[in-house]
């Protein structure tokens, strides 16, 4: 005897009608009738008196109804009791720069609606670690950007963004509709430090590929990037989709592949909250592109 059969029987017992019970259960009437008939066969007792006007419970049906309601109520409390025994579940989410803002509120709203009892702890990484703490085991899942060394890490693309050059609004380059790396060869540019992820560093330091100037500002945070441009007139690469403060603009750059905004997690993770986080994000992306 399974809970689904008992739920079906309880619906019929409470509605006193197979048609109304089927509508309540969002199912067709024939399989509902078969389920109750099979239940009577397994128990060996008639549970319902059937008539054109509806149904009524037999004494055996009254007894089963009371027991079934108690069993269903107990079963419905199982998730709550398991969660209480396990303590408050926590999901640690790593974020890179403004990646959480780039996702928008929809992912947070949808995930919290599915897991209202889960505590979400955010860990912001600096620009030297695009894994946001995944490689060091400090986070469960990350909102970040590619490319980086993804050994042992799986990713799901949320969005693909072309790259631009961030400059001051009064910089002559700001008047251009598109730039190339050659246009920027003589300009002072911000760059990531040598201890940053190598693949990540080489991508964002594309402007510094030829003979890095010791006077170029070395940055570790998004704020340092923007301030080096605003106050020192430096330039650098940035996704075109990023929001900039007043006084700065981002000019499209050709010849550089786009960057992907991704969810990242450790390959082989068995954390059900991580799986749910990924599935929620994938579902939202599918809805957005539909």
Image (cartoon, rainbow, N blue to C red):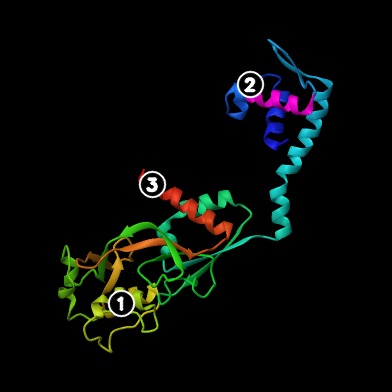
Q: Residue at x 71, y 43 (%)?
A: 76
Calculate the distance from the C-alpha at mark 2 to the C-alpha at mark 3.
36 Å
The residue under label 1 is 202
Residue 231 place in picture, x, y as percent: 30, 78
Q: Is any part of residue 199 visible from this angle?
A: yes
Query: Looking at the image, do the residues carrying marks 3 and 1 touch, with CB atoms under 8 Å apart?
Result: no
Furthest residue to the bottom? 214
Is residue 238 found left or right of 176 in the rendered image? right
Q: Nearer the viewer, residue 250 or 260?
A: 260
Is residue 52 found left or right of 239 in the rendered image? right
Q: In which quarter of the image is the C terminus?
A: top left
Whether 92 is among the magenta residues is no
Furthest residue to the top? 52
The correct choice, above or below, for 124 with respect to 274 in the image is below
Q: Nearer the viewer, residue 163 or 198?
A: 198
The residue under label 2 is 20
Q: Is any part of residue 21 visible from this angle?
A: no
Q: Residue at x 53, y 68 (%)?
A: 139
Q: Quadrant of residue 242?
A: bottom left
Whether 42 is among the magenta residues is yes
Q: Is label 2 in a helix, a strand or a loop? A: helix
Residue range (magenta) = 32-44
Q: Which of marks 2 and 1 is nearer the N terminus?
A: 2
Q: Is label 3 in a helix, a strand or a loop? A: helix
Q: Quadrant of residue 38?
A: top right
The residue under label 3 is 288
Calculate the distance from the C-alpha at mark 2 to the C-alpha at mark 1.
65 Å
Query: Looking at the image, do the residues carrying marks 2 and 3 touch, with CB atoms under 8 Å apart?
Result: no
The correct choice, above or below, for 233 with respect to 84 in the image is below
Q: In which quarter of the image is residue 156?
A: bottom left
Disc assigned to residue 150: none
């Amino acid at each position: 005897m399974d809970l689904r059969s008992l739920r079906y029987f309880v619906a019929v017992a409470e509605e006193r009608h197979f048609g109304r019970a089927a509508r309540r259960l969002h199912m067709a009437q024939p399989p509902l009738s078969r389920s109750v008939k099979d239940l009577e066969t397994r128990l060996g007792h008639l549970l319902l008196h059937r008539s054109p006007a509806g149904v009524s419970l037999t004494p055996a049906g009254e007894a089963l109804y009371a027991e079934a309601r108690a069993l269903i109520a107990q079963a419905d409390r199982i998730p709550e009791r398991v969660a209480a025994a396990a303590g408050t579940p926590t999901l640690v989410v790593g974020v890179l720069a403004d990646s959480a803002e780039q996702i928008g509120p929809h992912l947070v709203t949808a995930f919290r609606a599915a897991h209202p009892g889960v505590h979400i702890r955010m860990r912001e990484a600096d620009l030297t670690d695009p894994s946001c703490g995944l490689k060091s085991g400090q986070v469960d899942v990350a909102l970040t950007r590619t490319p980086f060394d993804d050994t042992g890490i799986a990713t799901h693309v949320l969005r693909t963004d072309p790259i631009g050059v961030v400059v001051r609004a009064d910089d002559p380059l700001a008047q251009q509709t598109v730039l190339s790396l050659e246009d920027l060869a003589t300009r002072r540019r911000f760059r990531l430090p040598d201890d940053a992820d190598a693949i990540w560093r080489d991508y964002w330091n594309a402007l510094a590929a030829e003979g890095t100037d010791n006077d170029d500002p070395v940055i570790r945070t998004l704020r340092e990037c923007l301030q080096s441009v605003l106050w020192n007139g430096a330039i650098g690469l940035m996704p075109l989709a990023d929001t900039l403060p007043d006084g700065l603009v981002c000019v499209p750059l050709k010849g550089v592949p786009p960057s992907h905004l991704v969810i990242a997690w450790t390959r082989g993770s068995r954390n059900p909250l991580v799986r749910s986080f990924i599935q929620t994000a994938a579902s939202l992306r599918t809805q957005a592109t539909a």
